[in-house]
Image (cartoon, grey):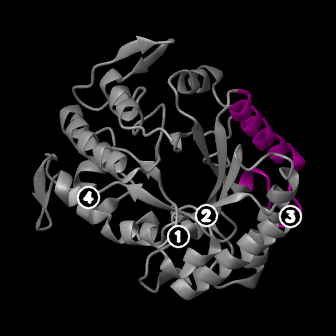
Amino acid sequence: MKNYGFNMLCMFGANSVKPKIDDAELDFIAEHGFNYIRLPLDYRAWIKNFDYANPDERGLEIVDGYIAQCLERGLHACVNFHRAPGYCINRPDLERDNLWTDEIAQDGFVRNWEIFATRYKDIPPEKLSFNLVNEPWWEDGKLGFTRERHAAIMRRAIAAIRAISPDRDIVLDGINGGNTEMPELADTGAIQSVRGYTPFNVTHYKAGWISHITDWPEPAYPAEYDGVSWNRDALAHYYRNWRALEKSGVRVMVGEFGCYDKTPNDVALRWFRDLLSVYREFGWGFVMWNFNGPFGIVNHNRPGAKYTTMNGLNVDAEMLALMKENRVNG
């Protein structure tokens, strides 16, 4: 079976760390045949005051617990640095250093992956993978980001991990916020991870953290946005470069997808139906952002949503069914 599951935001922010993942939620995920949990982590939960080489054992022990909870249920755990030393797509200004330009941040990034590789060396690769950095920056010259710098840093981290754990699967998010493939890293053997948030007019309607979209009209789907008639064919066409990358021998997965809670649920479901059928056609695994919350299948609160109580959770049963029916075995 491919990788299918959910992002669990238990250490998404250093100031909102949960001591454990909700057991009932993990039980539900496993019982419904999903097999993959992505853990987007904020490194500041175990690194204090930018002292990258000296982790706080208490923070790492919480991560140990998350992984153990997943493995107890037969769920693969993918550890992701959502906020890495020197970079985060959300509020990069909070970082003292810059991952793309500062040697101290680059050393810290690699050192922290060495710490994780050593700590989890004995966990088999089929049970644990590493997703190096969430959604690298855009090709716009800001933050000092370039494809060349990014590739060099990723290669360095991959080499450091494989020196400790040669068979560990490594996942690389596409650049441009996860949307652009990286043929320059095809030879690393890493999985490359794309996003499922297109068109933004549907998936991020009234998302308060994206200031330039506040005047968008209420979304429809299928519909035309920015001169593109978005329907199933357009969604499939959007991934054409990723399909070409895959044909070159690179494994591809969808590390995040979802629709924010301000989009009417009937619109969201029509979009989900087309999107997931495209992923099924391609044979790609997919991991929803998130599980319980504004992008998930539980308590997402999109207008017009209908919930079914399952295992004490308010589940969008139609959304759950779409995810299950579009999984591919083997």
- The residue where tag 2 is placed is 133
In what element is the residue under mark 4? helix
Task: Quote the CA–CA distance across marks 3 and 1.
Answer: 25 Å
Identify which amino acid the numbered label 2 is placed on.
Val
Does the magenta segment cover residue 117? no
Determine the image quadrant of residue 87. bottom right
**Left or right position of 200 against 244:** left
Task: Quote the CA–CA distance across marks 4 and 3.
Answer: 38 Å
Pointer 3 local density, CA inside 10 Å: few below 14, some 14–19, many at least 20:
some
Identify which amino acid the numbered label 1 is placed on.
Pro
Residue drawn at point x = 47 percent, y = 38 percent: 329
Pointer 2 or 3: first along the chain:
2
Task: Quote the CA–CA distance across marks 2 and 3.
Answer: 19 Å
64 vs 310: above or below: below
Asked if labels 1 and 4 touch by Cβ distance under 8 angstroms, the answer is no
Task: Quote the CA–CA distance across marks 2 and 1.
Answer: 7 Å
- The residue where tag 3 is placed is 164
Q: Position of residue 104 (x, y in %)?
A: 77, 79
Task: Quote the CA–CA distance across marks 2 and 4.
Answer: 26 Å
